Amino acid sequence: MKMPKVFLTGGSGRLGTELRKELDNFSAPSSAELNISNYDDVLVYIKKHQPELIIHTAAYTNVSGAETDRTQCWQTNVLGTENLVKVANLLKIKLIHISTDYVFWGDKGMYKEEDIPGPTRNYYALTKLIAESVASLATEHLIIRTSFRPREWPYPTAFEDIYTSQDYVDIIAPDILLAIKHHEQIPFSMLHIATERKSVYELAKRRKPDVQKGSKQTANVSLPDDISLDISRWQSLKKGFCE
Ligand SMILES: NC(=O)c1ccc[n+]([C@@H]2O[C@H](COP(=O)([O-])OP(=O)(O)OC[C@H]3O[C@@H](n4cnc5c(N)ncnc54)[C@H](OP(=O)(O)O)[C@@H]3O)[C@@H](O)[C@H]2O)c1
């Protein structure tokens, strides 16, 4: 199946870097080349490059920074998404928006696509939740909720009392690419792409066998108990795509 011509935001980020490796017909400006908070610049850039699909991974992702740098976080995550939606609708381009498991509070886990999200634990998560509802105003859209870690586990410890369905970015990105490739065959506007439920410690041990068990009780921020996503919708779609 042929990949459409893509406009990728956040191409220098953790996820964007992995996606770029497999895309061949794309434009991916840095934030210095195109600040998505500026509507006129977004319009001019997209008009010039004429993509068939917008993949929006750019975000202000510094969770603790967002608490003090609220304006910057809002302008990137909410206003930036709004600008892309407006241009997507004007030029009749589909938007694939990347969202997060953090739109859920994270007490019960195994959240389904149709579960009502919120409340959120921090300002970053709040802006991502609002960005989802903004993205849903794109005439043609797909919102992908996901969660990932860098290729290597970066800490000496990992929490054993938080459950998640996140995985390493090099495991998640190929699935997101598969969804992008088959986007026309996805009959949903919301999709969870992650892997099975496990503790953060279990995940860390896979790439850092000597990682030590930690507890979220030691953290000075509010963290979820179980933020795992139900991925059965994606599993069944993926089976069809891989047959
Ligand atoms: N990392 C996670 O654990 C995680 C979990 C779940 C969901 N997500 C979501 O996945 C997506 C990708 O996250 P990531 O961790 O790969 O991001 P990241 O590594 O923090 O990179 C952020 C990207 O956004 C771009 N960006 C930031 N502000 C911008 C602006 N005003 N205009 C244009 N571009 C801007 C940056 O460009 P420059 O480098 O050029 O400044 C960079 O490419 C985000 O939507 C995030 O919310 C992430």
Image: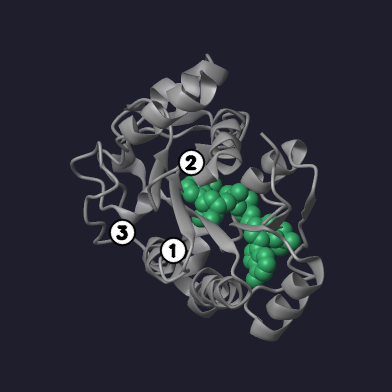
The crowd level at tag 2 (other Cα within 10 Å; few <14, some 14-19, many 20+) is few
Q: Please tell me the numbered disc located at residue 185.
A: 2
Q: Which residue is mark 1?
A: 124
- The three-letter amino acid code for the residue at tag 1 is Tyr
For label 1, count other residues whose C-alpha is less than 10 Å away and answer few (under 14), some (14-19) or many (20+). Answer: many
- In this rendering, position of residue 34 left or right of residue 134: right
**Disc 1 residue lies near ligand 1 with CB under 8 A:** yes
Q: Which residue is more in the foreground, 162 or 214?
A: 162
Q: Earlier in the sequence, mark 3 or mark 2?
A: 3
Observer-nearest of 219 and 101: 101
Crowd class of label 3 (few under 14; some 14 to 19; many from 20; radius 10 Å): some
Secondary structure, mark 3, is loop
Mark 1, secondary structure of its residue: helix
Q: Which mark is residue 121?
A: 3
Left/right placement of residue 42 relative to residue 179 reads right
User: How far is the residue under mark 3 from the one under mark 2?
Assistant: 34 Å
The image shows residue 204 at horizontal and vertical percentages of: 48, 25
Colour scheme of the picture = one colour
- Which residue is depicted at the point 32% across and 30% down? 232
Mark 2, secondary structure of its residue:
helix
Q: Nearer the viewer, mark 3 or mark 2?
A: 2
Residue 61 seen in this snapshot: no
